[in-house]
């Protein structure tokens, strides 16, 4: 298990983060600051 994610910027301005190893699991956020580490 890794913590590598793909981040997609949708046309409506929302960010979607997905785990390439588990494509059923998506994280959606409308605030880019939420995903900063």
Image: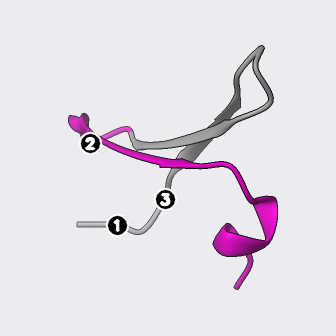
Q: Residue at x 66, y 69 (%)?
A: 35
Do the residues bearing badges 1 and 3 touch, measured as CB atoms within 8 Å? yes
Mark 1 vs 2: CB contact within 8 A: yes
Residue 37 is labelled as none
SS at mark 1? loop
| CB under 8 Å between discs 2 and 3 | yes
Q: Residue at x 51, y 51 (%)?
A: 5
- Residue range in magenta is 20-37
- Of residues 27 and 18, the one nearer the viewer is 27
Q: Is 11 rendered above or below residue 9?
A: above
Q: Which residue in the structure is indicated by mark 3? A: 4
Give the spatial CA distance, label 1 vs label 2.
8 Å
Give the class, few, some or many, for how many residues have Cα within 10 Å of label 3's Cα (few <14, many ≥20).
few
Work out which residue is located at the far top of the displayed protein and give it.
11
Q: Is residue 25 magenta?
A: yes
Q: CA distance from mark 2 to mark 3?
A: 9 Å
Residue located 74% across and 76% down the image: 36
Quadrant that contains the C terminus: bottom right
Give the image quarter of residue 23.
top left
């Amino acid at each position: 298990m890794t913590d590598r994610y793909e981040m997609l910027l949708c046309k409506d301005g929302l960010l979607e983060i997905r785990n390439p190893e588990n494509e059923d699991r998506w994280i959606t956020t409308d605030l880019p600051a939420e995903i900063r580490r």
